[in-house]
Amino acid sequence: MSELANAIADLKEDEVKKIVQDKVASGADPLSVVNECRQGMDIVGQRYKDKDYFLGELIMSGEIFKEAMAVLEPKLKAGQSEKPLAKMVLGTAKGDIHNIGKDIAATLLKAAGFEIYDMGTDVAPEVFINKLKETGAPILGISGMLTPSFEAMKQTIQALEAAGLRDQVKVIIGGGIVTEVVRKYVGADAFTDDAPEGVELCRKLAGAAKQ
Amino acid sequence: MIKETMTPTERTWAAIKLEPCDRIPVAPLMDVMFPSRHRGMTVAEGIAHPRRGFQAIVDTFDDAGGWDAMIIPGYSLPIPPSISAVMQVVIGDTRYPGKDPGIDEDSSPQFIEKELLTIEDYDEMIKLGWTGFAEKNIGRFFPLDPELLLAWTKRQMDRYKSEGELWKSRNIPSLCGALVMSPLMFLSTRRSLISFTQDLYRIPDKVQAVMDAMVDDLIKFAIEAARTTGIPGVELILERGGCFYYPMKIFERFEFRYMKKMIDAFTAEGFITVMHLDQDWTLNLPYFLDLPKKMCVSEFDSTTDIFKAKEILKDHMCIMGDVPAALSSIGTPAEMTAYCEKLIDQVGKGNTGFILSTGCTIPFDTKFENFQAMIDSAKNHLPQ
């Protein structure tokens, strides 16, 4: 594993900044630097699974990754950026204005290689549907922290069916209060109350959507 | 129906003190929202009208055939009359139903996560102490004459006392005469989770110095509130310091040392502490054995492994919880009964040390028949 990947995995923020800046200054391929950063994030994910890391380390690594990408993205030439793992539309359900869980999920999903269309909070079903149509994204993520968001999630999935998109779009719901009972109730394909698990589930959904 | 041989007060305190009960007590964490809707008001109406809102709680109690205890009396806040105490409450951006954009009249208030305190505030808090910082900065967070603010706290405190008195007249104990956050919970919610997490990793010594500057004032407010209300208990609001969020080294340094100091101080006053433990605390449970025996209640929201908690804490403290919010709002009475009976059998084993309750506050869109099933489970089912 590279020095950069290890620095990200060990949350060495200053070291990551320096390595990235040095690599950019020395003309390194920015895409390969991005990939090293992603490898570091994979180690973070593994340490989380092993219970060596917790949400705090995920947040820190996500912020370090964002800082690295702020340096690297302007250097990526048009068309050079790698093909995303999958496109995904993400937002908090209608009537719910909580953003923190969604924002953490968005950061980790971007770090994992997803192209995220973040629709914000209090997102109406038709807004989700329009963005799915516009982008052709095969995954929809709906976050919710309040029990009424269950109805909004259900209505969004019903709207997806009415729009004839349900077969093409996998839906994952997330939040501290969602359970398997909620997943069944709203008609989603997957649920999570854990951001890294959510990333793993989205990888699986992306694979399933391609088949 | 189980034949009852204890009053609700005797039953609840027996559970807290790990002494035998005639049955497992049941005490939902109630606020004004679910009762308002149950009694035909919107949530916005219930919040806007203290008397009607509180009456809705009392009516809901009667409609359900009663329960055993109020964790807090119901509507009001116990805030001592000082700027530094009130600043704990007013620093925040909560959006209210019927008042703020995006919050329907019949929805719950929602807390907006944003950076209300800055890094520079840390320096000032260390320099001036919490009270000095609060008095200097109150105008920044609340553009109202401080005298009006203090009058508001007096009204809140008076109502809190009278609400507690009403329950007492019905022989229903209120458990908490004060509400207070740990320093970590306060700073995390007022700096925002992401910025506060960065602070913990980037400037840990400064964060600790801020917590040191705050904790004695937090203890003081809580003790003053509990003394004033005459209700010998404190609801200590935790959530963000457990293993869902941080590793043990952070928990030990930034959460446990302060929560223990607070709980020890409350215990010295003869107050119990109800630890409001939202999110997962399973890995933190062994630490709770260092807290005063039979003087704490661990209140879980269904994320912590409550069965593991019983295994670890059974001879040390009472456990409360943990009916999942989703079960209350979209489950069925049969599902509710099955879950509650499982809790009573396993967490209530020995017929003590457990209070059946909602996981966090009861959701405002709870189906009444599900709520009734929860209450009836405690009244009808003995631990098997």
Image (spheres, coloured by chain):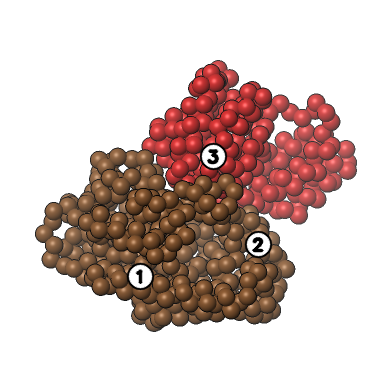
Chain colours: A red, B brown
> What percent of the width, then of the height, locates residue B151?
52, 77
Dot 1, how many residues are within 10 Å of its Cα: few (below 14), some (14-19), or many (20+)? Answer: many
Helix, strand or loop at mark 2: loop
Answer above or below: position of B190 versus B304: below
- The residue labelled by disc 2 is B116
Instruction: Judge depth for marks 3 and 2 and give the one in front.
Output: 3
Residue at point 70%, 45% (across, down): A65
Query: Label 3 belongs to which residue?
Result: A94
Q: Position of residue B235 (x, y in %)?
A: 42, 68
Marks 2, 1: nearer the viewer: 1
Q: CA distance from mark 2 to mark 1?
A: 32 Å
Q: Amino acid at mark 1?
A: Glu
Kind of residue indicated by mark 3: Lys
The three-letter amino acid code for the residue at tag 2 is Leu
Name the chain letter of the residue that bears numbered label 2.
B
Check the image and report above or below for B17 versus A178. Answer: below
**Secondary structure under the numbered disc 1 in the rendered image:** helix
Q: Position of residue B35 (x, y in %)?
A: 36, 54
* x then y, percent, for residue B146: 61, 77
Tell me the residue at 83%/38% (across/down).
Answer: A74
Which residue shows up at 26% across the image and 68% down it? B172
